[in-house]
Each structure stands twice: as C-alpha cells, then as structure tokens.
Amino acid sequence: MKKPIKKIGVITSGGDAPGMNAAIRAVVRACAYYKIKCIGFYRGYQGMIDGDYIEMDARSVKNIISAGGTVLQSARSQEFRTKAGRKKAFESLKKAEVDGLILIGGDGTFTGGVVFGKEFDIPFVGIPGTIDNDIAGTTSTIGYDTALNTVVEAIDKIRDTASSHNRLFFIEVMGRDAGFIALNAGVGAGAEEILIPEEDLGLDRLLESLKRSKRSGKTSSIVVVSEGDKIGKNVFELAEYVKEHLPEYEARVSVLGHMQRGGNPTCFDRVLASKMGVKAVEFLLDGESNVMVGFVNGKILTTNIEDAIKREHEINKELLRISDILSI
Ligand code: F6P
C-alpha cells in the first residue's frame, strides 16, 4: 500500500520564469487547505542535496503572486547529475520526512526527476515552468505568456527607433531550441521576417524577402531571430551577411537576453500557475506520480512526465504562413 502523504517538498529548478512564485503560493496554500505540511527547498535540487529548506505555511507566501523570479531561488545543479548527489538528496528528504515532491521547472528539471524517481521511492508531480514553452502535454508553460508580452513590448520600442532611422533590425529572442517566443511575439509585433529552428527559411529566401520589402516601399524592417535558429549564422553574422549583400540596408542587432525572464507575471500566467499548483497537490494526494500537470483544451490534466520530455511540443507553422501574408 502507498504511504499516505503528510508532507510535500517543493522546488523551482532550471531557468526561472515569471509565475513560478504564483505556483509556489498555490502549492503551499493547497497544502494548508488539505492540512498537510509543506517545505520549500532553496536553489532547486541543490537545496535538496544540502538540506537547505524552509517550512512554508499559508501566510509565508503572502504577496508573492505578483512577483517575478522565484522566492525559492533556482539552480541547474551539477551535483544532482551524479548518483552520489541524488543519494544525498534522498537522504535529506527522508530526514525532513518528505513523502512527495512537486517539481516546478522545465525539461532539465523533469529529466532529473525521472532519474531520481527510478532510483528512489518518492512520488513526484511536475509543474511546467519555463519561458520557452518547449514542453509537450501543455499548450502553455508558466512564464511563456509573460515572456511573449515582454518581447512584444521590447520590439515595439525597437520599431520606434528603426522607423525613425529607416533601419533594419535583427532582434534575437530566447527559446533555446524552440521557436515559440520568436514566432508568436514576431506575429504580435508585426515582424517582417521570423526565423525559428523548426523551419529553415534559408539565406537566399531571407535576402529575397528583404528586397521585396524595399520594393514594396517599406523603409524599416524587423527580423525576429530565435536563438536556436538553424540558418547557419548567429544574429551578428546574419546582420553582416545582409549588409554585404544588400548595402542599401542599414542594419543593427539587438539581443534581448535575460530581461525576457524577468518582470511581474501576466494575469494569464498567474491563473495558470494557480490552477496547476492546486491540481499538482491534489494529484499527488490522489496517489499519482511520475506525471506532469498540463493545460489542455481549457482543463488541467496529467501527462506521463517521460512522455512530456520526449515528445516534441509541436509549433503551429500555420502562423508562419499568416506572418508571410501580413508582412506584404
Ligand atoms: O530555458 C530558459 C532559458 O532562458 C532559455 O531560453 C535560454 O536558452 C537559457 O534559459 C539561458 O540559460 P542561462 O540563464 O543559464 O544562461
């Protein structure tokens, strides 16, 4: 028979994402509601290894729903990649009398959780938190919507200066190997071209498209480049290449970087995190393990966590076609 859950441990791990605090709050308050104890480990798996945690009650998470970052801090623990590190983590969980875990993070976090769950007897539920939106089994990860809005706002501002100087801007956005941020923020900000890893536009087509823009009377242009794009050149090389082949363009580069991970979460991310946090606790109490909660067709459902990591979260390439039509 499964051990009843009396105490839950929660971590945030990997790249932080806006809305992680709202998820922590939801987990802690759901635990309080169901009268079970909750502790939060600092710095993800590293805090589990070091036994560095804090007891969390309903009041300890006041006023964090609106805050960016994560009050539990985050890390990509190298020690947890070793068997010895994971053994230490399990021993510290036993010492703290933790019966179940909630892991808030992205695919690296979940990969760690799967290995840990196979080696040691501890149930766990994952909550997808990453700006990249690169996890299958959920249409949206916590932090993605906020990052999109941050990127759109940044591109709008760059557009102001681009049009004042008749310039072409290459704007690099995050997303690791996935183009969700680039594609959706690119459409939202009316970019002329969007380069994503899932579709190789090719250098010739890019030049052709920029020539067409000039011919159609456009005086400034925005090309959004996903950091994982496979065109074969980084964003600076790309700008140089275009300057060489189309000297009529005055090109500039802007790399948005880590500002995309910060800021107050949007209402969408707060609500998503609130739902996912409560449901993660309920699923764990119902005896589920090795699953991730996901937002699918308006409902919070579970997916096998290995499936969520292995399966590709498919991007909607139809949006590229829409973007082509709209950037005429
Ligand atoms: O996974 C989130 C993310 O921001 C990616 O978009 C990016 O590639 C990576 O993390 C950057 O990681 P770090 O903050 O460790 O440089």
Image (cartoon, helix red, strand yellow):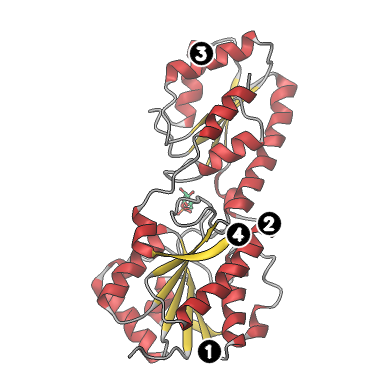
At label 2, the amino acid type is: Thr
Considering only order in the chain, which callout, 1 or 2, is on the residue closer to the N terminus? 1
Name the residue that disc number 4 marks.
Answer: 18
**Alpha carbon distance from label 2 to label 4:** 8 Å
Dots 2, 1 in contact, CB < 8 A: no
Q: Secondary structure at mark 1?
A: strand
**Alpha carbon distance from label 2 to label 1:** 29 Å
Considering only order in the chain, which callout, 4 or 1, is on the residue closer to the N terminus? 4
**Alpha carbon distance from label 1 to label 3:** 61 Å
Q: Residue at x 47, y 88 (%)?
A: 7
**Alpha carbon distance from label 4 to label 3:** 38 Å
- Please tell me whether residue 99 is drawn above or below residue 213 in the rendered image: below
Considering only order in the chain, which callout, 2 or 3, is on the residue closer to the N terminus? 3
**Alpha carbon distance from label 1 to label 4:** 25 Å
Q: Position of residue 3 (x, y in %)?
A: 37, 90
Dots 4, 3 in contact, CB < 8 A: no
Q: Secondary structure at mark 2?
A: loop
Q: Quadrant of residue 88?
A: bottom left
Is residue 16 toward the left or the right of residue 124 in the image?
right
**Alpha carbon distance from label 3 to label 2:** 37 Å
Dots 1, 4 in contact, CB < 8 A: no
Name the residue that disc number 2 marks.
Answer: 266
Callout count: 4
Name the residue that disc number 3 marks.
Answer: 208
Numbered mark located on residue 37 in the image: 1
Is residue 265 toward the left or the right of residue 180 in the image?
right
Q: Position of residue 174 (x, y in %)?
A: 51, 44
Q: Position of residue 268 (x, y in %)?
A: 66, 57
